[in-house]
Image: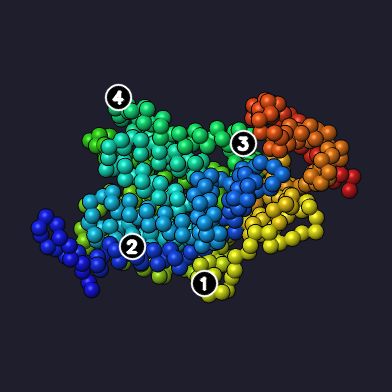
């Protein structure tokens, strides 16, 4: 059966089931399924989900309240399905595939359909983009960010009733999903408010902002801080900013080496910015202004990724910009290119994908492209196909036991998901540890972005075992007493509320700084003595 009969207004018609857009979308989804996996760090968030459903709140370690995850909305949407089904591996893949379908449906519903242009400018580039395919699942929040941007773009172009509310809500939810995506949306909002200031319904904007405002207030009250612990662990390392910029260059070059089609997508949008700017200055067309601001947002977010040095997962912080770039190309060129040009583009992209040098060759030719960054090939393992074939299994929570109630470890992903929930885990990389995250790294350079080793302060593990501060350095003990009250004290304690305010205003930073200087002097003297 190749078509379906329908009746409408007395007329009889047929719709082909093998529609080109349907087929192209199915191919894209099959590629996503082929890459489907749950990466190591995704389990950090999932342990919080499991602890919450066991009645322990939004915690990773049960003895303290620390926001160890960067993706609150992604965490929250897992709670109902995991409560019903109980298999986090399949649950997160189901959620991810639903989000992918929503993102594609909204994007395809946004522009007038030119089938050939839609396939060649949007569906084909995303099908050939390894970064998009990998992070359309992976256990990370990327795919929810894609869906929220697709909703934002749909409202921006279609302008339905109360579209200001939709735009504000989509942006707000994206920030709850990952706070730093605000960088992506700033240029768009700057353009909208500047160009339509007299028309802005501020009540709708404030109503739409409720999710991010509500989450930040909750975070400040519950955790004691506005930012996740990962911000302190990965960015407050004491490492020189020039090193971050050097790692950021490697991260962007890695995309060129590992996923050239995605790099071309980004580059094409960045190159379009001056062209769109000149066009907008000439005719002041609102649609051009919208596309220009989104392209500027993709560039600004990519520049932000460069400034923070990227991360060790190839493409992890670039998938939103890649999806937005394909969306932009469809909006900009769908009615501009002739069929012949579209066919040439499609063939060129396929040839690049087929004949691009293998990863081993690129690693030898450009070592800088892989400095501190793992390749996508290395990370896509233990995937859906491996699970279905029995090559891998998902560990159960609490299935790993350790000989002590306090345990030092450097792997918070699958191991952290599996270890007994009652164990107090000290994270040597500081991702889930609030004290270590606020201390500088043990070395002066980061060899792998996002993996930042800390030294364990004297007396810290003793305190976790006994509650006794006496073996800690006096300066650090004073600092940690304040921090410990915030993360482990009575939620409604007036003293805790006061300390949250003082700590966030930096009232106790001098204690930490003096401790760090003291430790560095001691190390210098020790090296001199040797």
From the image, state whether disc 2 or disc 1 is nearer to you.
Answer: 1
Q: Are marks 2 and 4 in contact (CB under 8 Å)?
A: no
Q: Residue at x 33, y 28 (%)?
A: 201
For label 2, the residue is: 25
Cα distance between the residues tagged 1 and 3:
39 Å
Q: Mark 3 or 2 closer to N-term?
A: 2
Q: Residue at x 78, y 52 (%)?
A: 405
Q: Residues within 10 Å of mark 1 (few under 14, many from 20)?
A: few
Q: Are marks 4 and 1 in contact (CB under 8 Å)?
A: no
Q: Mark 3 or 4 closer to N-term?
A: 4
For the residue labelled by badge 1, is the local secondary structure a helix, a strand or a loop? helix
Q: Mark 2 or 4 closer to N-term?
A: 2
Q: Residue at x 86, y 44 (%)?
A: 526
From the image, state whether disc 3 or disc 4 is nearer to you.
Answer: 3
Residue 198's mark? 4
Task: Determine whether 512 is above or below 450 in the image.
Answer: above
Cα distance between the residues tagged 2 and 1:
23 Å
Residue 222's mark? 3
For the residue labelled by badge 3, is the local secondary structure a helix, a strand or a loop? helix
Q: Mark 2 or 1 closer to N-term?
A: 2
> Residue 35 at what x, y percent from top left?
47, 65
Quadrant position of residue 113 = bottom left
Q: Nearer the viewer, residue 60 or 297?
A: 60
Q: Nearer the viewer, residue 8 or 25?
A: 8
For label 1, the residue is: 388
Cα distance between the residues tagged 3 and 4:
38 Å
């Amino acid at each position: 059966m190749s078509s379906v009969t329908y009746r409408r207004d007395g007329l009889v018609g047929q719709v082909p089931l093998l529609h080109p857009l349907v087929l192209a979308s199915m191919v894209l989804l099959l590629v996503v399924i082929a890459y489907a996996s749950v990466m190591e760090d995704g389990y950090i968030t999932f342990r919080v989900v499991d602890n919450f459903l066991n009645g322990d709140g939004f915690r990773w370690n049960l003895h303290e309240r620390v926001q160890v995850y960067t993706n609150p909305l992604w965490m929250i949407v897992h709670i109902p399905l995991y409560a019903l089904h109980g298999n986090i591996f399949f649950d997160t893949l189901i959620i991810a595939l639903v989000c992918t379908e929503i993102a594609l449906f909204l994007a395809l519903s946004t522009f007038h359909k030119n089938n050939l242009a839609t396939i060649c400018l949007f569906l084909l580039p995303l099908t050939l983009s390894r970064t998009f395919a990998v992070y359309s699942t992976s256990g990370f929040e990327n795919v929810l960010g894609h869906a929220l941007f697709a909703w934002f773009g749909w409202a921006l172009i279609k302008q339905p009733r109360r579209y200001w509310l939709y735009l504000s809500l989509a942006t707000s939810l994206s920030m709850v999903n990952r706070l730093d995506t605000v960088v992506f949306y700033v240029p768009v909002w700057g353009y909208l408010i500047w160009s339509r200031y007299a028309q802005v319904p501020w009540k709708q904007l404030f109503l739409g902002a409720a999710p991010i405002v509500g989450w930040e207030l909750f975070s400040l009250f519950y955790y004691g801080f506005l930012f996740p612990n990962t911000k302190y662990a990965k960015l407050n390392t004491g490492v020189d900013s020039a090193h971050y910029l050097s790692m950021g260059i490697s991260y962007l070059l890695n995309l060129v080496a590992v996923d050239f089609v995605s790099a071309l997508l980004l580059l094409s949008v960045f190159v379009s910015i001056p062209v769109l700017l000149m066009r907008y200055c000439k005719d002041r067309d609102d649609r051009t202004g919208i596309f220009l601001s989104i392209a500027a947002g993709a560039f600004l977010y990519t520049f932000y990724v460069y400034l923070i040095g990227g991360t060790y997962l190839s493409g992890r912080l670039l998938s939103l910009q890649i999806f937005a770039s394909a969306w932009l190309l469809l909006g900009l060129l769908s009615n501009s290119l002739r069929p012949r040009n579209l066919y040439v583009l499609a063939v060129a992209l396929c040839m690049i994908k087929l004949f691009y040098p293998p990863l081993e060759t690129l690693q030898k030719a450009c070592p800088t492209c892989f400095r501190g960054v793992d390749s996508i090939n290395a990370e896509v393992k233990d995937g859906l196909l491996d699970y279905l074939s029995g090559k891998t299994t998902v560990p159960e929570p609490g299935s790993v036991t350790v000989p002590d109630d306090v345990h030092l470890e450097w792997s918070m992903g699958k191991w952290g998901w599996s270890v007994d929930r009652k164990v107090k885990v000290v994270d040597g990389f500081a991702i889930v540890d609030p004290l270590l995250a606020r201390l500088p790294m043990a070395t002066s350079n980061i060899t792998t972005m996002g993996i930042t080793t800390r030294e364990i302060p004297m007396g810290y593990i003793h305190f976790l075992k006994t509650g006794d501060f006496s073996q800690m350095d006096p300066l650090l003990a004073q600092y940690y007493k304040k921090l410990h009250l915030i993360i482990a004290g009575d939620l409604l304690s007036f003293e805790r509320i006061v300390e949250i305010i003082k700590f966030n205003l930096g009232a106790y930073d001098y204690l930490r700084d003096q401790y760090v200087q003291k430790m560095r002097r001691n190390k210098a003297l020790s090296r001199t003595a040797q």
